[in-house]
Amino acid sequence: MGRETRNRVPRHVAVIMDGNGRWAKRRAMPRHAGHRAGVKSARRTVEACGRSGVEVLTLFAFSSENWKRPPSEVGALMRLFLEGLEREVDDLHRNGVRVRFIGDRACLAAELVSRMEDAERLTAANEGLVLVIAVAYGGRWDILQATRSLADEVAAGRLEAAAISEADFASRLQLHGLPDPDLLIRTGGETRISNFLLWNLAYTECYFTPCLWPDFDEREFAAALSSFAGAERRYGLTPDQIETPGLAGA
Ligand code: IPE
Ligand code: IPE
Ligand code: MG
């Protein structure tokens, strides 16, 4: 099989950082205060991943559907991304983190996009944790933009529709070149994907916790890793085939 099936650290952890608004509401604070507290949790999680040997961390910060929130909340979130980038990028760079953004940049303010590109350029040669931040990202949008890119290739006569492989498709998705997430963590108690990485999560282990994102700390992260370590990843095979790899076909 060539795949380890148990007791390992996930190479790629993806997180749906949910529950900021409820965290703030419980404290009679405005929702944006929850988002601000959420930035601290994101920083803690980046550090915890670095220490645990995780190679890639993907954080879902803002979905395609989050544009439909009240303009004041969208504005507060966009300001927070810009401020967060300005404040954190040097530190991330010093720690060897490589930053990459996924999502529809055409929807974002030019100033924010230019900061994002600066951060990507500055950290491009780093060899530590790969930090992927999903902003204005939707799994359906991702699949559509990959499809359009393949359709262009076919129309230009460079590719045959019948020859399109999974690898061709994956190479046009936003996470191209990175392994699929091994572990998905969703905080905030909901047990849904909410249009996150629809293609890449096909065989990801999912960990749902009621913990609200601003309360997510190292102990919570360790609990998620330990749940992952106990899971048997079968990729469609039978348990016997996993125990005795020689039994696996093809
Ligand atoms: C997640 O927290 C952050 C974003 C979606 C931007 P929420 O803002 O969704 O918080 P809840 O789910 O309303 O508590
Ligand atoms: C998912 O949270 C998106 C992010 C965490 C960025 P939402 O709060 O938008 O998801 P729903 O609306 O509960 O499905
Ligand atoms: Mg939410």
Image (spheres, rainbow, N blue to C red):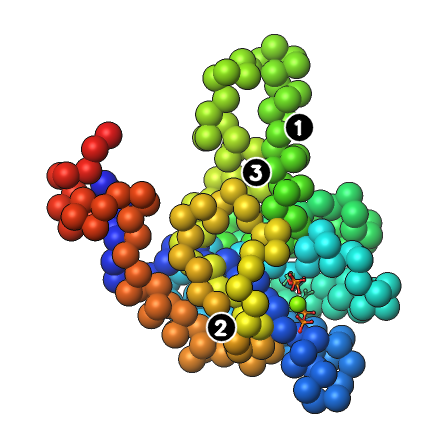
Q: Dot 1: within a 10 Å radius of its alpha carbon, few (fewer than 14), some, or many (20 or more) residues?
A: few
Amino acid at the residue labelled 2? Thr
Position of the N terminus, as image quadrant, is: top left
Q: Are marks 1 and 3 in contact (CB under 8 Å)?
A: no
Picture coordinates of residue 94, whole percent (x, y): 54, 64
Residue receiving disc 2: 209
Point 52% across, 39% down: residue: 176
Position of the C terminus, as image quadrant, is: top left
**Secondary structure at numbered mark 3:** loop
Q: Is residue 154 left or right of residue 5?
A: right
Q: Is residue 14 left or right of residue 133?
A: left
Which residue occupies the foreground of this view, 250 or 85? 250
Q: Is residue 44 left or right of residue 155?
A: left
**Secondary structure at numbered mark 2:** loop
Q: Is residue 50 above or below residue 160?
A: below
Q: Nearer the viewer, mark 2 or mark 3?
A: 2
Point 18% across, 44% down: residue: 241
Q: Is residue 35 above or below residue 104?
A: below
Which residue occupies the foreground of this view, 87 or 42? 42
Q: Nearer the viewer, mark 1 or mark 2?
A: 2
Residue receiving disc 1: 148
**Can you tell me which quadrant of the image ligand 1 is in?**
bottom right
User: Along the polypeptide, which appears first: circle 1 or circle 3?
Assistant: 1
Q: Which mark is residue 240?
A: none
User: Along the polypeptide, which appears first: circle 2 or circle 3?
Assistant: 3
Picture coordinates of residue 138, whole percent (x, y): 65, 48
Amino acid at the residue labelled 1? Arg
| Residue 63 visible in the current orientation | yes
To which quarter of the image does residue 21 belong?
A: bottom right
Q: Which mark is residue 173?
A: 3
